[in-house]
């Protein structure tokens, strides 16, 4: 059955071009288009698409406000289009916090220069997020304000998430329920906590790290698949929300308790036995920049059995081979459970390879990190 897509953008050219690209895939059907956020809500309710592509800047109602309404009224996987700028990163992170699943750069030049590459990337994203847990997700979006006839000023959107309104937890399969009830962790003097994630990761990391106290006893490294233009803004956002300190990692940074270092987009991050971070150029032979396997592998070499690693939501299998090296060194590997993942890909790869020492739901991971680290 074809994936039904609603295309939302105030640019007639971009609407047509995205519709043409998606319609060229026989397994995707564009069921409608909308020119602003209010139309998007109406179309989402009437057409019930499997996926919505959403622009941010639109008349009548912006994309973030529309996402909040859609996630409250008819939860649907949303793919945001964003600009690769610092401000574009902040807006995109707001959209992800509102309930969007993933994002793609809105780049007219790429559409003209590399149409086949753009088609492949866009269609793959649509297929991937159509299989996400967004419709049954426990990621509750904030309750929307009443629809306005004019857009809110950009400055009013802010960058601090609004308080969340709890929603019922998703129905879990017996296997997922059992997996989420791994025993409480054993306490151990870990020298490093390493967390890897991809699609759904920005919100997942926020949910985990905000549970940690300022005096968290272990250094933390974070590997999130994200463009270079986004990681600095993401680190700044986490730093404002968390009691621990968070910053984008730089070459020569030292690991220290209560500090989380986020791997910079487009590059690779390694750690050494002296507690120093090395930032290396992104290798074109590697699919992911940053790559979870690279950081996990360096941690296994440098810290042996003193690493607590966590693999969160994301597509693909990045982190599996690095987790294998960590297990061989005697370190600990946790995976997020299927029911709380947006995309159960990376954690599934860990579980299927029998590398997970424990499988926890997203909301339990933060408290278990506190329990495990002495």
Image (cartoon, rainbow, N blue to C red):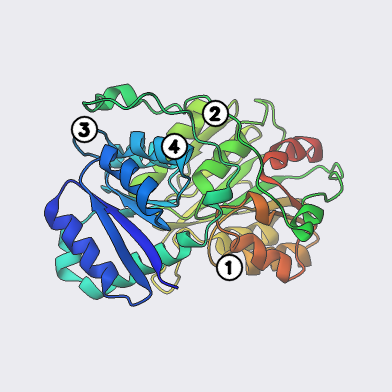
Q: Earlier in the sequence, mark 3 or mark 4?
A: 3
Mark 3 to mark 1 CA distance (whole Å): 41 Å
Density class for disc 3 (Cα within 10 Å; few <14, some 14-19, many ≥20) is some
Picture coordinates of residue 56 (x, y %)?
27, 41
Residue at image x 56%, y 54%?
A: 133
Local SS, label 1: loop
Instruction: Say which of 130 and 112 sits in front.
Output: 130
Where does label 2 land, which residue? 164
Q: Earlier in the sequence, mark 2 or mark 3?
A: 3
Residue at image x 27%, y 57%?
A: 32
**Is 234 left, or right, of 355 in this rendering?**
left
Residue 317 appears in the rendering = yes
Query: Marks 1 and 3: in contact by CB < 8 Å?
Result: no
Density class for disc 2 (Cα within 10 Å; few <14, some 14-19, many ≥20) is few
Q: Earlier in the sequence, mark 2 or mark 1?
A: 2
Local SS, label 4: helix
């Amino acid at each position: 059955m074809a994936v039904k897509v609603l295309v939302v953008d105030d640019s007639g050219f971009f609407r047509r071009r995205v519709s043409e690209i998606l319609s060229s895939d026989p397994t995707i059907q564009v069921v409608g288009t909308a020119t602003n956020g209010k139309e998007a809500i109406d179309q989402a309710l009437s057409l019930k698409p499997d996926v919505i592509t959403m622009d941010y800047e639109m008349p009548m109602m912006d994309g973030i406000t529309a996402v909040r309404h859609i996630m409250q009224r008819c939860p649907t996987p949303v793919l945001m289009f964003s600009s690769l700028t610092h401000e574009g990163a902040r807006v995109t992170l707001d959209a992800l916090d509102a309930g969007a699943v993933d994002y793609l750069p809105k780049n007219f030049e790429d559409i003209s220069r590399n149409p086949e590459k753009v088609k492949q990337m866009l269609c793959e994203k649509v297929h991937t997020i159509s299989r996400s847990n967004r419709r049954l997700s426990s990621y509750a979006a904030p309750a929307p304000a009443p629809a306005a006839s004019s857009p809110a000023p950009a400055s009013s959107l802010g960058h601090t998430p609004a308080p969340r309104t709890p929603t019922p937890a998703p129905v879990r399969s017996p296997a997922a329920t059992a997996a989420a009830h791994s025993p409480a962790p054993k306490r151990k003097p870990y020298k490093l906590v390493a967390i890897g994630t991809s699609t759904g990761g920005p919100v997942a990391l926020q949910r985990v790290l905000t549970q940690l106290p300022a005096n968290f006893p272990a250094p933390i490294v974070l590997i999130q698949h994200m463009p270079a233009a986004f990681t600095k803004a993401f680190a700044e956002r986490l730093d404002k929300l968390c009691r621990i300190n968070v910053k984008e990692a730089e070459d020569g940074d030292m690991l220290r308790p209560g500090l989380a270092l986020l791997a910079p987009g487009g590059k690779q991050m390694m750690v050494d036995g002296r507690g120093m971070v090395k930032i290396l150029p992104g290798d074109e032979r590697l699919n992911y920049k940053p790559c979870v396997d690279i950081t996990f592998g360096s941690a296994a070499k440098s810290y042996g059995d003193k690493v607590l690693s966590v693999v969160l939501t994301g597509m693909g299998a990045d982190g599996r081979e690095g987790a294998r090296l960590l297990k061989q060194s005697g370190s600990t590997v946790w995976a997020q459970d299927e029911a709380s993942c947006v995309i159960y890909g990376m954690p599934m790869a860990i579980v299927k390879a029998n590398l997970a020492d424990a499988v926890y739901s997203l909301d339990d991971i933060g408290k278990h990190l506190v329990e495990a680290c002495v």
